């Protein structure tokens, strides 16, 4: 009988039990075994390891829950970007990658189109001066200020002087009273150079004065001599700068000298109209600046002095003078007579006297400075200059330049309906003038839904761009009728324009004729 393996004797003579057969583990059993081993290791691990693992899990959850998504810009960055613009940004689109252009959507009442005051496109430095625009406040304007002031904004005197300083009190009092300024200008033949300079800087002057006193009104009285085709013409005191701009662009120097050797002009008539016929505000600061290169007639001296004394009886009223000289040499006999005559008027009016050589290249900037000094007084000149220096570059210049390069007449027509109307839009529209834009300006003249200021701005665009439109002086307090003679004449001027050019970016449009 063969012995069983289980009881097979060992070499030493004993018996050895046979080994237990090993069973292969299934995959599920292996997973369970690993879990048991992991739990055993965790039970044996130090408590600090478990705490560290839990902290890591909590930190991971917190990061996922509270970390800002990539498209959100941190608040400090947003504040720094807003501080670099004159007007606050409505959004931070400039910080995100550029997107493909989307089709234009017509503005609605629930989704109105932003005005130029809300637009700041950071573009390369503009070349608006090369398009025939003036060289004063271009790029200095701010936002707000009303349609009549073209984007000028109110400056804070506390940024240049301490609270309670006499200058701060002076500006505060002016803003409560209001400011009325009237230019009384000799418009005889020798004054054309000055009138040209005045056209160039009138918008700068309006921006400067309204930045200090937003409730500004401007007016102008032009005078010639008694034997000329007219003696006086005037533009009424108005807060709308384009009321005066339209009058000034039509003004031409002519006439004078009612007899061959007669140098004096009808100064007394210009002063009479300014002091007696214009609608000055009661209690406002009232400033007259008499501009000319010839004295009054000696027999009319009493009339001129009486008009000035009567006007200056109000403590808020002042009369200044500006003598226009031919060159920087010795004064001529006529200039000496004019200086003496104007000196008497200024003494009676409590003002100051200035002189200007209109043929000099920098005479436009000098004129702007003289108007500021005549308006506010020499004692405040340095403080006013410091206040006006607070204005930084106007980024909207770049926006206007971009649409000029695109020749986007539709954009300019939309912007001409903005409130406030920015003066850069008016000048850009005049430079870009084509038939479509001209027809759009004609439509504004007939539009009863816009203000008179918008209609006057549209008329000024037409006059700046089209010499044939000059001399047309309709009353735009109401819209023009379709059969109004003035509108028919303007329509003929627009109809002579070439057809609309296709949009392009090749070159900037030519400067409008002045």
Image: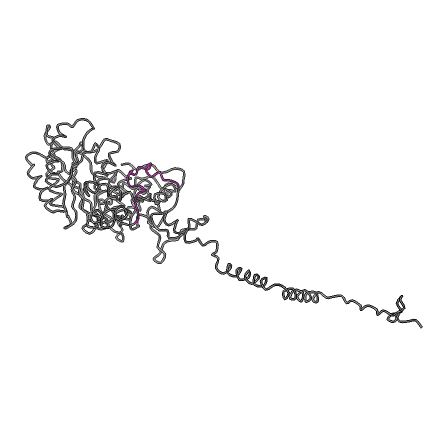
Which residue is farthest right? 1
Is 257 on the left or on the right of 328, as rendered?
A: left
Quadrant into which the C terminus falls: top left
In the rendered image, is residue 454 in sight? no
Q: Which residues are magenta?
A: 124-143
Q: Nearer the viewer, residue 280 or 388?
A: 388
Q: Quadrant of residue 407?
A: top left
Residue 244 placement, left or right of 50 = left
Q: Residue 429 appears at what percent x and percent y?
A: 32, 43
- Please say if 324 is above or below 408: above
Q: Position of residue 319 (x, y in %)?
A: 14, 41
- Type of colouring: one colour
| Prevalent SS, magenta region | loop
Instruction: Specify whether residue 9 is in view.
Output: yes
The image position of residue 425, as x and y in percent, is 31, 44
In this view, the residue farthest toward the bottom is 1
* 294 over 236 or under it: above or below: above
User: Residue drawn 78% across and 67% down?
Assistant: 22
State the image coordinates of residue 56 (x, y, percent, origin top left): 55, 60
Of the 4 image quadrants, the one containing the N terminus is bottom right
Residue 127 magenta: yes
């Amino acid at each position: 009988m063969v012995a069983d393996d289980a009881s097979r004797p060992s070499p030493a003579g004993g018996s050895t039990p046979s080994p237990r057969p090993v069973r292969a583990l299934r995959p599920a059993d292996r997973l369970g075994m690993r879990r048991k081993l992991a739990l055993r290791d965790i039970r044996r691990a130090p408590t600090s390891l478990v705490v560290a693992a839990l902290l890591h899990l909590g930190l991971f959850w917190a990061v996922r829950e509270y970390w800002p998504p990539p498209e959100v810009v941190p608040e400090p960055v947003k504040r720094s970007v807003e501080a670099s613009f004159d007007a606050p940004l409505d959004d931070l689109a400039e910080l995100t990658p550029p997107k493909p252009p989307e089709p234009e959507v017509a503005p609605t009442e629930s989704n109105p189109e932003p005005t130029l005051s809300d637009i700041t496109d950071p573009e390369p430095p503009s070349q608006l001066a090369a398009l025939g625009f003036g060289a004063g406040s271009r790029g200095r304007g701010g936002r707000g200020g009303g349609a009549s002031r073209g984007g000028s904004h109110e400056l804070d005197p506390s940024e240049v002087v301490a609270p309670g300083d006499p200058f701060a009190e002076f500006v505060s009092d002016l803003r409560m009273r209001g400011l009325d300024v009237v230019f009384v200008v000799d418009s005889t033949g020798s004054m054309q150079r000055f009138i040209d300079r005045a056209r160039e800087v009138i918008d700068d002057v309006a921006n400067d004065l309204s930045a200090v006193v937003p409730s500004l009104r401007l007016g102008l009285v032009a005078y010639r001599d008694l034997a000329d085709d007219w003696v006086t013409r005037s533009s009424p005191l108005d807060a709308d700068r384009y009321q005066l701009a339209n009058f000034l662009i039509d003004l031409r120097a002519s006439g004078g000298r009612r007899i061959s050797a007669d140098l004096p002009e009808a100064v007394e008539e210009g002063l009479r109209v300014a002091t007696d016929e214009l609608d000055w505000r009661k209690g406002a600061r009232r400033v007259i600046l008499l501009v000319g290169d010839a004295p009054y007639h000696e027999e009319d001296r009493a009339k001129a002095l009486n008009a000035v004394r009567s006007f200056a009886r109000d403590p808020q009223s002042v009369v200044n003078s500006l003598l226009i000289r031919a060159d920087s040499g010795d004064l001529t006999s006529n200039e000496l007579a004019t200086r003496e005559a104007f000196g008497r008027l200024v003494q009676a009016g409590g003002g100051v006297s200035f002189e200007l050589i209109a043929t000099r290249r920098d005479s436009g900037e000098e004129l702007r400075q003289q108007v500021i000094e005549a308006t506010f007084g020499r004692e405040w000149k340095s403080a006013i200059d410091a206040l006006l220096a607070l204005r930084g570059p106007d980024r909207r210049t770049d926006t206007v330049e971009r649409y000029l390069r695109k020749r986007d007449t539709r954009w300019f027509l939309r912007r001409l309906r903005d409130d406030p109307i920015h003066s850069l839009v008016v000048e850009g529209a005049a430079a870009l003038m084509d038939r479509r834009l001209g027809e759009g300006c004609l439509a504004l003249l007939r539009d009863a839904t816009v203000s008179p200021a918008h209609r006057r701005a549209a008329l000024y665009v037409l006059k700046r761009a089209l010499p044939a439109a000059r001399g047309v002086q309709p009353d735009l307090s109401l819209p023009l009728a379709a059969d109004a003679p003035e509108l028919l004449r303007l329509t003929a001027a627009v109809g002579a324009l070439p057809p609309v050019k296709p949009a392009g970016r090749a070159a900037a449009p030519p400067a409008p004729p002045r």
